Image (cartoon, rainbow, N blue to C red):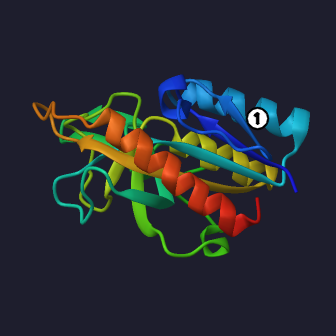
Amino acid sequence: MTITVLFPTATEASRFQHPRVRSVISGVGLTATAYATGKLIHQERPDWLILAGIAGVYPHAALSVGQVALVASEAEGDLGFFTPQGFAHLSALPLDMDFERRHTLHCPHIEAVSGFQLARSLSLNAAMAPFVNSAAVDIENMEGAAFFHVCLQENVRFLQLRAISNVAQPGEDDWDMAGSVQALTDGLHRLLAQLGA
């Protein structure tokens, strides 16, 4: 069985090593992640793809800095238009255009592992964007929705693991980078053991 772990940055990957698992730096953001995920699938077609990184937690969520969560769902939070009434997600706009209206993407493989807290996530190119609706989600990151979309389209088994590094709120600058990277690494080893790596 082949497993590849994608990390957005070398910092997030810095403590991870596994003799039977390949790791790849995908780059930060939705565009870089979509490209790296698609390229990896077409070149190697691993049995499992895992996206592993840090994330911000929204103040209302039942997660705290240092915890690790398995991401159950993703949405592109800042995909849309500003209207006179405020920001509207593209999937909710009454546009007279023929296109796929998608909002939330779900991971169908989360039952492959157990013992992890689940999280609902928004992916944003503009972190802590004050105009997005974060009421129904727990965390934010900058890559997950692109990763989910490509893996679902290509029918590849995937999971996303996130360690909470900060509170996703403007003015909250107290990040625990070292602690969250260590928590991510520990959680990743636990997840890989359950997958049989």
Would residue 131 appear left or right of 7 to someone viewing this image? left
**Disc 1 on helix, strand or loop?**
helix
Q: Position of residue 91 (x, y in %)?
A: 46, 50
Residue found at x 25% / y 41% = 166
Amino acid type shown at disc 1: Gly
Q: Position of residue 61 (x, y in %)?
A: 23, 61
Quadrant in which residue 110 is drawn: bottom right
8 in relation to 138, above or below: above
Q: Work out whether residue 93 can be spotted.
A: no
19 in relation to 7, above or below: below
Q: Work out whether residue 155 can be spotted.
A: yes
Q: How many marks?
A: 1
Would residue 46 appear left or right of 92 to someone viewing this image? right
Residue found at x 50% / y 75% = 115
Location of the N terminus (image quadrant): bottom right
Q: Residues within 10 Å of mark 1 (few under 14, many from 20)?
A: some
Would residue 107 appear left or right of 56 to someone viewing this image? right
11 in relation to 57, above or below: above
Q: Nearer the viewer, residue 36 or 163?
A: 163
Location of the C terminus (image quadrant): bottom right
Q: Nearer the viewer, residue 99 or 50?
A: 50
116 in relation to 165, above or below: below
Residue found at x 24% / y 59% = 135
Q: Nearer the viewer, residue 50 or 140?
A: 50
Residue found at x 80% / y 47% = 20
* Residue position marked by numbered label 1 in the rendering: 38
Q: Position of residue 105 (x, y in %)?
A: 55, 57
Quadrant in which residue 27 is drawn: top right
Q: Nearer the viewer, residue 131 or 52?
A: 52
